[in-house]
Image (cartoon, coloured by chain):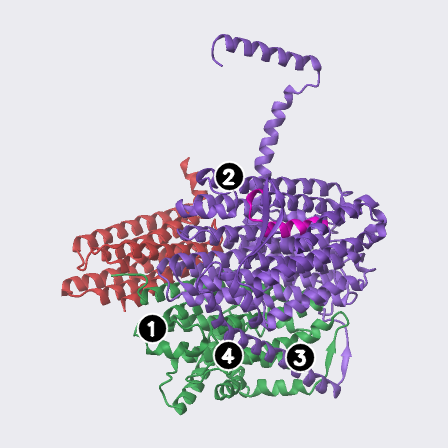
Chain colours: A red, B purple, C green
Amino acid sequence: MTLLFIILYAITLIYFALSERVKKFVVLLSIQGALLFGVVFFSLYKIELFDFIFILIETIMVKSIIIPWFLNKVRKHNNLKRVHEPFVPVFYSIIVVVISLLFSFLISNYLKDNQIHTLYFTVAFASVIFGLYFIIIHKNIFSHLVGYLIIENGIFLFSLTVGNVMPLMVNLAILLDVFMGVLVLGTFVNRVGNTFESIEIDQLSKLKD
Amino acid sequence: MDTIFFIAAIILTFAVFVVPKQFQYFWSLLLQVSIVIISSFWAIQSLFLSSDTLIRAFMPFMGSTLFIEIDKLSAFFILVVNFTVLTGIIYAKGYLRPYFITKNKAEMALHFFSFLWLQISMLLVLMFRDALAFLIAWELMALSSFFLVIFESEKKDTIKIGIQYLIQMHIGLVFIMSAFIWAYVQTGAAFSFDGLNIYFASHNPFGLFFLFFVGFGIKAGFIPLHSWLPHAHPAAPSHVSGVMSGVMIKMGIYGILRVLTYIHHDLFYIGLLILTISLISGVLGVILAIVQHDVKKLLAYHSIENIGIIGIGIGLGVIGLAVNIPAMTVLGFAGAILHILNHSLFKSLLFYTAGSVYQQTHTRNIELLGGLIKKMPKTALFFLLGALAICGLPPFNGFISEFLIYSGIFKSLQPGDLFTDVILLISFTGLAIIGGLAIFCFTKVFSIIFLGSPRSNKTEHATEVENTMITPNFLIGFMIIAVGFFPALFMGPLANVVGLFSNDAASIQQMIPVLNNISISSGIFIALIGVIWILRAWQQKKQTVKHDATWGCAYTGANPALHQYTATSFADNIVQLVNPVVNVKKEFNGFDEKEVFPEERAFKTHSSDTIEDNLIIKPTGKILAWLKEIAVFQTGKIQHYLLYALVFLIGIFLLTLLNWI
Amino acid sequence: MLSLLLILLSALFFPGIIAKVKAKIGGRKMPSVFQPLFDVVRLFKKGAIYSPVTSFIFRIAPVVYFASVLVALLFIPLGGQKGILSFNGDFVFFAYLLAIGKFMLIISAMDTGSGFEGMGANREALYSMLVEPAFFILMGSLALFTGIVSFNNLYSVMHISTNLSYITGVAAIYVLMYIAMVENSRLPVDDPKTHLELTMVHEVMILDNSGFDLALMHIASGLKFAIYGTLISNFIIYTTWSIYVQIISFFLVQSLFAAVVGILESFRARNKMEKNPQWMLMLTAIAVVTFLTTLIITQKIFLN
């Protein structure tokens, strides 16, 4: 069953490469949050109640509901409709996503280490690579925020690969990271959007002066 | 005994210079037919009748006797070469007719002489094992094809292209020669192909194989070694292009296969090298073909693509040997070797029909053609046959060879390990993409040249070509349909050739029921077409069949020819996807907002071969620029040169004094 | 034989069900389920108009296209019955047979010398090229999983396998459904109900066909739908069920598939034309993910 959610997560990465609308990014992020909940639910052997509630909050509440709600607010405030043409055409981005998925699946096969659960390693690695690529090709700060969140999802999966019990501290640290990132960037985007008309990064270099 | 006839025929080719002009063609035809008969006799003996290599003493050479050895691989190639060259010379009669008037006796004699020697040198390449004799025959092949390419030397581009071709062939020769020399120096064995056996047994084969691959690859036309192909094939007259594209580039494949027969270990990386380069050649070749407007340049790029397909088969076969999956080996090699035959057939057919179009319309630019099917129906039909075959569509022969390769791939998915499976995934995806792009390209070419309305007045005077130009098409078409509908007949000799590479060649026999099923399905397909045609004819007899103009959405203003799609527009949506490779630039001054009454505008597109640009044109441009700087020393005055000599003398004197040299 | 009859039967209803579902969702009055059939019969009673620009190609292309679809139909198994023609590697023949049909259709469109048809031909050539790899990769994953390279025993072996084969099955159905929509020129790639020639892909290629030829085209598209529907229903129907249960579930699945197509068409707008290639590449990407899943399931990728 875990495999099913992992595969669906990989498919959401493909849809990230395909889509060009900001609203769809947010929807995909919340779907990813729900899928992560599914992964965790089906793979933990013994769950204490506290841990389980914590994970539930983190994945469903934070990743699927709170953050997308916040992102939607930012989106509406800045009136973002669609991502302007990224540097690399979408056609090539999809090819890059497929190659990175193939690559990470192959790597996780060759990592023959008993300490790592390579099942999660696959999409975790692909997620991090794709998140970085996503930030590189898009010009919009909002898309950078979304890319950052994809990387965070990947790191969450990485934490799953190295343990079968959720260490509380790791999770708290990740949550803190996410909160700071989203709050700071979200506020930043709002302020910038108030002062200038657009939030494209090439326009932002005017801020230097 | 029969060798004497062969040698006699070779010597008699020189007589073509003294024969009067109107008999030159017949003399060459006679010689060619005799050479074909003798060599095919040997080949058939070797391939079908006996099981060992046919060896004949040929001539005294460098002190010892030179032997010709024809084993199954050589025999197969000999038959392919002979068939294509024969169709070429039959086609040439009609094609060269206008040239007999404009060219003088010596030029025509040289042309026929070169054509004969092209065939002879190709046969010698296939028959010699001794390295020096092989290299001499290879060089003769390059020289004779050079003279053939520059036939239309009144066009100033042609000579430049010919020289570029000759240079690249010689670079290939250097690679092959150094590979032979290296093996000889390392092992001290005989300076021949058989000497390679000893080298490969004791050394890592990859390095030497790479040298051979580059040398033979330049001849075959693998990307990035392909840049001579798209220039040389259009420049040459059509019967020569057909022969060059159909069989001469296969000599490179022959070389690679011959070297492969001696390697028996450490095959994985060699296979991976061949497969990667072939996949790239296949895909890039067909993408570059899509943007061409010159029909022969387009066909040349398709040759690159098909060499890629053959290479995919060979690469998969070699990898199969390395990972020990018999299905992959046997079917990969079988598909590749059958594709060698198939490609020579349909490519020569396409070049001959394109040549007929050129002869009638005097242009190779497809943007100026259109509607030729009404004026040249037989030519159009044969072009369509070639197009359907080259896209690998059933029920013709291209499908059979691709089917063999696909079967090899799909059968090996389960036995293979992870890395093999990923390689197989990339291979069949690549093959599917190549097939789809080929369909895109050939629908474009066929429809723009033959269908719709004429796009310029070049087609006004076109009529159907004479019968001698159509006869070879019939012969080739017959072979295409034979291989397509009765592939099981060809499996026997194919198994014999594959047996040189793999021990399980007999398992090809397992494919025979499958191929028979394909024949039956193809038969049902054709029968159904006939039945539905008859049904329609019966239904339409009872109804009215009118003739009325094409639906133009009630737009009656423009000339109907202008309303049609052009080749550039057809290729446009793929160009948007693959622009980094084809580098299409559009030049167009748009309409200004203030321009109320727009004036005439022109639109130009220009494409270039990115690989050729970055690999050859840019570096040579830089070297030439640097050399121009140095040319400042070449002042043309004798006094300056004397000054240089004086400086040199003083320099040598001083240096000797100081004991530095 | 039985499978052929069942598929032909379902092809009669298929376009009708789609039209009915779309009408119901769109709040319009529903036509009869047999309306497309009546249209075809009406076309068979009509004569034809041929343009003088066209040639022999224009006359033979519809016949070749129809014959190719018909012969492709003979390969499809249903439940436990195998197709009339079946051999190892037959799905390659199947795919290329449909390709020759498309080739003839494209050149017949260019034959009319009309800019509209050229546009449709151009787009159709690109889209069919992009969708080929998805089909092959899908078949490759099935061949990898079952070790069988023919349509014939593929499905029976699939059902015997483990629970994990459900994932492959579901992904395969998803991709096949979209491939079916692309091959039949449906939304989101091409809108069959648009009347603007500049936005058509398949419809504009058959703009100049009339009478018998047009009837052949309509029947062929119905047959193609039935072919893909059967391929999908084979994933769901178990060969171990009794023959009557199989037949009933076959018709149920076909109707459900038609209804889903209708629903998808009603709620989805057509992609912007330049976004179509990347949308179709997405199908290939999902097919590659399916292939990777199969590699995991067959333990070639070793994950712990």
Residue under the point 58% across and 60% down: B76
Q: Nearer the viewer, residue A132 or C10?
A: C10
SS for callout 2: helix
Chain letter of mark 2 equals: B
Residue B591, percent from left and from top: 68, 50
Which residue lies under the disc numbered 4? C75
Residue A66 belongs to the span the image colors magenta = no
Distance Cα–Cα, label 2 vs label 1: 57 Å
Could you tell me if residue B575 is visible in this image? Answer: yes
Disc assigned to residue C165: 1
Judge the density around disc 2: few (<14), some (14-19), many (≥20) Cα neighbours within 10 Å. some
Q: Earlier in the sequence, mark 4 or mark 3?
A: 4
Chain letter of mark 4 equals: C
Judge the density around disc 3: few (<14), some (14-19), many (≥20) Cα neighbours within 10 Å. many
**2 or 3: mark nearer the eye:** 2
Residue under the point 77% across and 65% down: B376
Disc assigned to residue B181: 2
Q: Earlier in the sequence, mark 1 or mark 3?
A: 1
Q: Amino acid at mark 4?
A: Phe
Which residue lies under the disc numbered 3? C213
Q: Amino acid at mark 3?
A: Asp
SS for callout 1: helix
Could you tell me if residue C113 is visible in this image? Answer: no
User: Marks 4 and 3: CB-CB under 8 Å?
Assistant: no
Residue B213, percent from left and from top: 51, 47
Instruction: Examine the image and state in which quarter residue C260 appears.
Output: bottom left
